């Protein structure tokens, strides 16, 4: 699959900026660059060492396009594992296009999405899970997702899988050897050690599979629905959490007719807050649609903040408690936080009374004044407590990739079959089939087993230039 073409692409974001970086990779990268580059010191860049920088000009015949800094990376010492040139030019969109068009005329072709990283994988510079982590690293927008991507890029996940695969492969070889001596009825694979290995593999796979629940929310953000009656301060709370005027705040009930979403990073974890339309009986057709969407968002959310206005709760507590029970019964598995807003309008005794009434519901309770920004930090800490960050703090491997998760599930299923076969004295030839399947799914993660369709699907999601 490794193309012999020399490819070129803009490696920095498109548009004008202070500088831009144009990347060239391929066997002829250095000679093509040499044809359009004039060093200020008169050096011939084809004779320079790898990992060197050179100041000069990009020229098209007698026309000078720009003064640039040119970086040389030779062969296996480069990101792609082949000759690579990076040209740092001024960030004018016109200059970028002029240089790229010049290089295309000199023999380069435009790189496909992710083709530089694809070549890195195909040239053995990284395995497939590390290559996928490159895209996750680029997309990371909070500390936690960045930490996971960096750990995977350094090979934490793939090394763990590779060790399991190698141990299983050793036993698979012994099982295969037994098949060659089937008539002699000999055993080369120690069944006790084999059982211990299978149990250890099951344990590791189960931990990795379970980690996906945490990894998925860290990677994509935790959706939090803010629900409640109209005009209780949902939009004010969203603005307080985000520390900006994101939602319209009005005394008119039903101001929020549609859901409003925004993101906030709390303790390195991304949260997606959804300010929904107020829940109430209404004849307004548009508002009714908004309320229906509210229940859809509750269904999609992982955490629900049910907001009440303190003075209303004081006089209508039984009705509100009924509403809370309704939400709990309808969504029993979702963490529900009851948030009492405008507590600055209550006395200590009134607030204590409200707490007593809600104790029987077994829900999390937070008291705030969104307008005065009281209790907002406590609410943020409460939200953070719903995320199991222990594995993250301990630098354990966390799975965030759906493809990896699917392969782990399939490998786990095959390992369970092998374990069952061992317990029931299944013949070696039948166990060997299940072992091969497990090895196949391990290989799919790291790229030891690939096909063109798989690679196409993975790298199509990369940006051009990476």
Image (cartoon, helix red, strand yellow):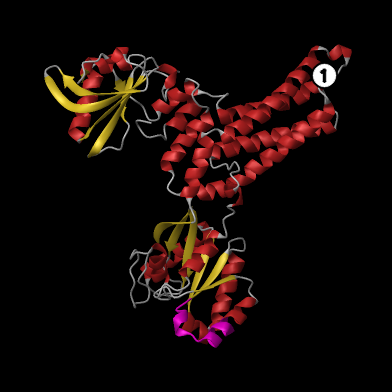
Is residue 261 positioned above or below 123 on the image?
Answer: below
Secondary structure of residue under mark 1: loop
Q: Position of residue 144 (x, y in %)?
A: 50, 48
Tell me: 192 left or right of 256.
right
User: How many tags in the picture?
Assistant: 1
Viewer-closest of 405 and 285: 405
403 lies above or below 105 = below
Q: Is residue 107 visible?
A: no
Q: Position of residue 241 (x, y in %)?
A: 42, 65
Answer left or right for 245 relative to 166. left
* Quadrant showing the N terminus: top left
Give the camera-side residue of 98 and 235. 98
User: Quick check: can you spot residue 257?
Assistant: yes
Tell me the residue at 71%/35% (across/down).
Answer: 201
Rendered residue at 48%/81% (across/down): 310
| Location of residue 462 (image quadrant) | top left
In this view of the protein, which residue sits in the foreground, 221 or 422? 221
Q: Residue furthest front?
A: 41
- The magenta segment: 341-354
Q: Nearer the viewer, residue 298 or 154?
A: 154
**Location of mark 1 (residue):** 188
Snapshot quadrant of residue 331: bottom right
Main SS of the magenta segment?
A: helix
């Amino acid at each position: 699959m490794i193309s012999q073409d020399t490819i070129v692409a803009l490696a920095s974001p498109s548009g004008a900026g202070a500088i831009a970086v144009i990347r060239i990779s391929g066997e002829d990268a250095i000679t093509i660059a040499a044809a359009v580059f004039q060093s200020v010191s008169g050096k011939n860049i084809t004779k320079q060492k790898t990992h060197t920088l050179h100041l000069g000009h990009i020229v098209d015949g007698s026309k000078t396009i720009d003064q640039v800094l040119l970086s040389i990376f030779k062969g296996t010492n480069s990101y792609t594992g082949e000759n690579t040139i990076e040209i740092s030019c001024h960030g004018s969109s016109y200059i970028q296009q002029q240089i790229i068009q010049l290089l295309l005329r000199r023999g380069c072709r435009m790189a496909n999405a992710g083709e530089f990283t694809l070549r890195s994988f195909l040239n053995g510079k990284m395995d497939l899970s590390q290559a996928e982590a490159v895209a996750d690293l680029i997309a990371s927008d909070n500390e936690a997702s960045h930490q996971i991507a960096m750990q995977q890029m350094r090979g934490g996940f793939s090394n763990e899988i590779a060790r399991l695969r190698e141990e299983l492969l050793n036993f698979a070889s012994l099982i295969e050897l037994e098949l060659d001596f089937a008539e002699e009825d000999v055993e080369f694979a120690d069944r006790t050690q084999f059982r211990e290995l299978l149990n250890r593999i099951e344990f590791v796979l189960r931990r990795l599979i379970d980690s996906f629940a945490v990894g998925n929310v860290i990677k994509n953000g935790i959706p939090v629905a803010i629900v409640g009656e109209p005009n209780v301060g949902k939009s004010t709370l969203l603005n307080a959490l985000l520390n900006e005027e994101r939602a319209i705040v009005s005394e008119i009930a039903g101001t929020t007719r549609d859901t409003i979403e925004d993101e906030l990073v709390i303790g390195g974890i991304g949260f997606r807050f959804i300010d929904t339309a107020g829940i109430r009986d209404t004849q307004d057709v548009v508002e009714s649609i908004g309320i229906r969407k509210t229940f859809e968002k509750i269904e999609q959310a992982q955490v629900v903040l049910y907001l009440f206005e303190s003075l209303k709760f004081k006089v209508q507590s039984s009705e509100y408690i009924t509403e809370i029970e309704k939400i709990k019964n309808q969504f029993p598995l979702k963490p529900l936080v009851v948030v009492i807003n405008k507590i600055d309008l209550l006395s200590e005794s009134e607030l204590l009374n409200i707490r007593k009434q809600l104790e029987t519901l077994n829900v999390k309770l937070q008291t705030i004044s969104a307008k005065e920004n009281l209790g907002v930090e406590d609410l943020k800490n409460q939200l953070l407590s719903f995320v199991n960050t222990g594995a993250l703090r301990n630098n354990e491997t966390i799975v965030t990739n759906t493809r990896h998760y699917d392969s782990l599930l399939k490998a786990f299923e095959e390992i369970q079959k092998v374990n069952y076969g061992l317990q029931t004295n299944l013949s070696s030839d039948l166990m060997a089939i299940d072992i091969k399947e497990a090895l196949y799914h391990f290989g799919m993660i790291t790229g030891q087993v690939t096909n063109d369709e798989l690679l196409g699907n993975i790298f199509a999601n990369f940006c051009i230039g990476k």
